Image (cartoon, rainbow, N blue to C red):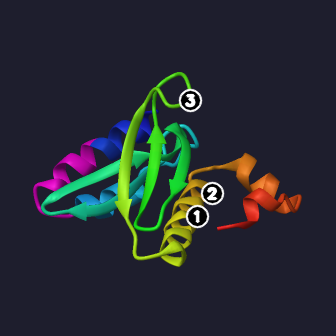
Amino acid sequence: MAMRKWLAAVAMTLSSVGLYDLALAQVDTSPFFCLFEIPPDGEKRVWINLSTIQYIEMRQHDLRIYYGGGKLGSGHELRVPIVGKDDGYAFMKKMQTTAVSCGGAALSANRAAGNEASQRP
């Protein structure tokens, strides 16, 4: 816990000199707080906590990520523009890779067991 506080202080210090991204990458990982940056829309940068995602819908021109809330569909919706389904699968693959690196042990176990749902994207 002390290490996280120290890293947070370092991140705040580094943000003043433009090195916040480097500090963010060094923060201890956790399956309960796993940040993933959504492609920027203008100057606004947005990160989503992957552990709060309920489900994802892939449409022809966007991915709709539903997260937060207690009951299915009671949370928030985030739309990510995509060019086509291959682009959508690539984006979900990046999310999956990030989740595994954050300590997604359950996802790793499913993949090791050959669970079809974890094989794609």
Residue highlighted by disc 1? 97
Contact (CB < 8 A) between labels 2 and 3?
Answer: no
In the image, is residue 61 above or below residue 36? below
Tell me the residue at 81%/54% (across/down).
110
Give the distance between the C-alpha atoms of the residues marked 2 and 3, in whole angstroms: 23 Å
Residue highlighted by disc 2? 100
121 or 85, which is in the foreground? 85
Identify residue type, mark 3: Leu
User: Quarter of the image holding residue 3?
Assistant: top left
Picture coordinates of residue 74 (x, y %)?
46, 26
Tell whether 98 sits left or right of 64: right
92 or 85, which is in the foreground? 85
Q: Secondary structure at mark 2?
A: helix
Q: Is residue 17 highlighted in magenta?
A: yes
Q: Earlier in the sequence, mark 2 or mark 3?
A: 3
Name the front one of labels 2 and 3. Answer: 3
What span is in magenta?
Answer: 9-19
| Magenta region, main secondary structure | helix
Picture coordinates of residue 5 (x, y %)?
35, 36
Give the distance between the C-alpha atoms of the residues marked 2 and 1, in whole angstroms: 5 Å
Crowd rating for badge 3 (residues with CA inside 10 Å; few <14, some 14–19, many 20+): few
Q: Earlier in the sequence, mark 3 or mark 1?
A: 3
Give the distance between the C-alpha atoms of the residues marked 3 and 1, in whole angstroms: 24 Å
115 or 66, which is in the foreground? 66
Residue highlighted by disc 3? 72
Tell me the residue at 89%/58% (across/down).
113
